[in-house]
Image (cartoon, coloured by chain):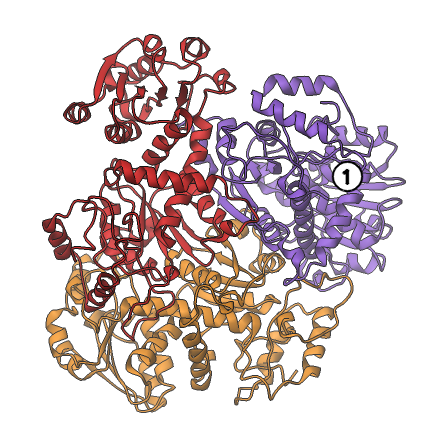
Chain colours: A purple, B red, C orange
Amino acid sequence: MSIASSLTSATICGASVFPKALGYSSEFPSNLPSPFESSKICLTTSFPCSMDPKKNATWNLTRNVGPIQGIRCHAMQAAGTRELKKFELSDVIEGKQFDREMLSAIFDVAREMEKIEKSSSQSEILKGYLMATLFYEPSTRTRLSFESAMKRLGGEVLTTENAREFSSAAKGETLEDTIRTVEGYSDIIVMRHFESGAARKAAATANIPVINAGDGPGEHPTQALLDVYTIQSEIGKLDGISVALVGDLANGRTVRSLAYLLAKFKDVKIYFVSPEIVKMKDDIKDYLTSNGVEWEESSDLMEVASKCDVVYQTRIQRERFGERLDLYEAARGKYIVDKDLLGVMQKKAIIMHPLPRLDEITADVDADPRAAYFRQAKNGLFIRMALLKLLLVGW
Amino acid sequence: MSIASSLTSATICGASVFPKALGYSSEFPSNLPSPFESSKICLTTSFPCSMDPKKNATWNLTRNVGPIQGIRCHAMQAAGTRELKKFELSDVIEGKQFDREMLSAIFDVAREMEKIEKSSSQSEILKGYLMATLFYEPSTRTRLSFESAMKRLGGEVLTTENAREFSSAAKGETLEDTIRTVEGYSDIIVMRHFESGAARKAAATANIPVINAGDGPGEHPTQALLDVYTIQSEIGKLDGISVALVGDLANGRTVRSLAYLLAKFKDVKIYFVSPEIVKMKDDIKDYLTSNGVEWEESSDLMEVASKCDVVYQTRIQRERFGERLDLYEAARGKYIVDKDLLGVMQKKAIIMHPLPRLDEITADVDADPRAAYFRQAKNGLFIRMALLKLLLVGW
Amino acid sequence: MSIASSLTSATICGASVFPKALGYSSEFPSNLPSPFESSKICLTTSFPCSMDPKKNATWNLTRNVGPIQGIRCHAMQAAGTRELKKFELSDVIEGKQFDREMLSAIFDVAREMEKIEKSSSQSEILKGYLMATLFYEPSTRTRLSFESAMKRLGGEVLTTENAREFSSAAKGETLEDTIRTVEGYSDIIVMRHFESGAARKAAATANIPVINAGDGPGEHPTQALLDVYTIQSEIGKLDGISVALVGDLANGRTVRSLAYLLAKFKDVKIYFVSPEIVKMKDDIKDYLTSNGVEWEESSDLMEVASKCDVVYQTRIQRERFGERLDLYEAARGKYIVDKDLLGVMQKKAIIMHPLPRLDEITADVDADPRAAYFRQAKNGLFIRMALLKLLLVGW
């Protein structure tokens, strides 16, 4: 189990096998249909990874592990391909599971994805694979991005945006049961859920890879990856950059995840620019401090923007203010990215935004080459193509 | 018309032609586009089948048959391939349409389906075919199973879960008109409807195959087939088995259909174990008796389970109890499949459940090899693959 | 810009490039990923086309044109393939954008589409292309027709019927931003919207082709094209025909568009037959008169039908009458197409209907060869296949 044990507790692979596509053989119990068999990629790592046996044990306790899984796990351990593969990726659950070497390796694959031509053999590498998009709440933008990624690689998609119907209060099915059913129909599950932790629970149950496409106030790791990838692509580096995080820093899942990931790189400087009422919370500030990341709060966006590589603007979310529309109105108009701001920004700096935007970036900024937000959205496609490839057919 | 006439009134093929894929030629009226032409498989049978001319007559009266259909029917009759093909399958409407030879033949195909490899030519046998999933009420589980089946064979899918919009009261389109439109876009229709008899009506209209994916309180034939297939696969036989049907036997469409199908086999013994308030109804009991099937009611699940090959558990459906939640609570807790029950069950017996389950099977049962319910769900995939293949390209 | 300038203001191509599939090379700025690059077909025209510089100017003003588009446009102009291609088609926004030569050319392609066999290479001409069906209101019939068209040509589809979620009032994203995101995931956008003019706005934003699948009370150009195509296919000509438009002529988008398109042909005679309360409006009558089209109002459907080539029946839309159900009931029963009408119609005349129908055509008419409405619905498939082909890979 120790080889299979993984980067973090979020990367579960005790019950995994090598994918068929890689040509490894393994024995299956005869009462299980093999060709469309559930399978997880479980590649050994050449990077340092946490090997907390307690976490694995906990996972074993909370999971229903039958004899079948045991056999599979054995087959995997016997294979011993430690030298061949870069690191193990069996699920994508949270930003924290990635270190900078992993990010770099994933970005290399994403960069390959950008170059795939329509007619090439590369555009068919996931041919025959089925992705289930199991969305417990609609998120059309994220769903379309994943489905586009799968189809750009020749894969197929099963879609549901009303997954709540599976587990409605009336019927009362557990998430685990739903996952066990859906994994019978597909090769990978992309799940959006309204509850924090749902993705981890799903991954612990599934014998096929699970990608977290957002679980409530929790994580949205592919958004975090595409943000970092965009900075890498546009600025050319991640060490030594300075980044302004602007807008709703208290509630924005995106900026919080980005701050976590940036802390993995060297000599990063982060500026927080937000209305008083939606300031960045202390947990992130403490995390940055303890990881040696320099940060500073400012109320002068112009001044900050003039010295940053990245201005990451976010939407002030009306729904967070309840009935205090006066506070909302005051907060939303405070920090706007407009032509004037462009005027003070550096030539090679960029403006990012997770989208959708309202008027926190004015429309006349869009035509400027430094407006990177639509390229950023498009990068989501390449990151998701890369993850789907890695999870389904490996490196 | 007599050669075309069919197994039961539910298998309609008067207006059918041989599918293009089989290489039969037939003449079409020139004003109809031929390649994407609607077509039904209409293979002659080498099994005995009911040839009730009145049913065919009735069907002719209720159907709008134009000159076009007449020509096609003629072409079909002229072909005369009686010796080549096993039996005719032009639609899947109800469990009753299948006899044991047909079931056996379909199961043989399903078993082939289990073996299809991702990269093989077999995984492309439905390439170029389009399935329309026309769901008048959502049933994500069933829909995904059908769509997975189609895609596993290289076919494509058009999906709608809001088919009511087609025929909304406001617009008032008939089901027949909807079918005539959708058959122009697809090669096969999988329909879920809220009204009993809707699938039969659709099949009578369509010139392409129709599969009933559940019509209200009526039929759900693919569920019935996958249940029998699971018993066959897991126990190895259907003659001479003993089966306990447990839970809500009054309202459960599944157990009623299963009882019907089991009656086609020899020396079957059925036990009914249910709370008093949801007992199996007399029509099924009478049917079993008149078909020579031994059955017995029992209130002792432990005792029954100890001598059965199959314990088929079902969910007590809260919605059947209206405001009498006290009765519901009393009923639902009465017969639970748990570790204790596993203790008395035979080594090779299995536990089945149509899913979703609540707590009528405890989670600690899942890891036992005799817990067959997730394999059962997966078998739905293979049965549906088999039916799609048979309906679209024949044997 | 003048070569690129287009047929009407609706056909926007200032920011377009030749599609990859046609093998034209063009330079892209290095910060844009090229293979899945947005691209519009922008072929030069050999037909006379309106070249209103003011319209182009207006368009330039309302659009955010960055340096990227400028480069592309230059590349296109340099290519100069005037002699090779028939006409330019970069978006399908409104019926008016087509003249009779264009219609004829599109119909030629639609006719080829009818002949495509499942297994042929033709059925894969859109392989690798992705269509996004961005529906802001559900229209299952139209959506399935487009998706079938795309899949019949080997293309793939990203579907959303809840596109309002993209731009919900709560989140407040502009249509333009949504389009810029979706064009990153797909190669062509088919959009249904509740607001007139939305499709034109989307086309002005998108760097990939946009097809209007209905925008509120505005246009539904593919319906108009399929109607004319059906008359051409069934009657064999468009010049010199006489057409009865029957039913709700005041509110019916279809009959209005059809009248516009028929005015492009010679010696057409149009009869308006409708209840007083839903008469054809003056704008259409004036348009016909000024284009030399003979028209006449009549209250005698029998008499009109006896001398027409086409009886185009429409549904009286209940929702137009508000609470005046008495007026609705009076209007709807007035002009019915039934067996009696068939009796007076010419042998080669046809009955059309945009569907869905209620009882304005009785069911016993369906079996008559002159009942063309289901063939008409099917023609929508071929027209949409033709448009998708033309927009994505050209002639």
Q: Is residue A55 above or below residue A25?
A: above
Q: Nearer the viewer, residue C227 or A218?
A: C227
Q: Nearer the viewer, residue A380 or C153?
A: C153
The C terminus of chain A is located in which quarter? top right
Query: Which residue occupies the extreme front position in the image?
Result: B83
Which quarter of the picture shows residue A252?
top right
- Percent of width and height locating residue B144: 45, 42
Residue pictured at 42% horizontal, 44% vertical: B385
The N terminus of chain A is located in which quarter? top right
Q: Nearer the viewer, residue A115 or B127?
A: B127
- Percent of width and height locating residue A186: 53, 40
Tell me how many marks there are. Answer: 1
**Badge 1 density bin: few <14, some 14–19, many ≥20, Cα 10 Å:** some
Q: On the rendered structure, is A176 left or right of B255?
A: right
Given the image, what chain letter belongs to the residue carrying mark 1?
Answer: A
Residue pictured at 45% horizontal, 42% vertical: B113
Q: Badge 1 is on which residue?
A: A85
- Percent of width and height locating residue B212: 31, 44
Q: On the rendered structure, is B364 left or right of B329?
A: right
Q: Is residue B51 above or below residue B128?
A: above
Secondary element under disc 1, as helix, strand or loop, is loop
Q: On the rendered structure, is C381 left or right of C300?
A: right
Q: Is residue A323 visible?
A: no
Which quarter of the picture shows residue B386?
top left
- Percent of width and height locating residue C146: 44, 62
Q: Is residue C64 visible?
A: yes
Which quarter of the picture shows residue B370?
top left
In the rendered structure, which amino acid carries the disc numbered 1?
Answer: Lys
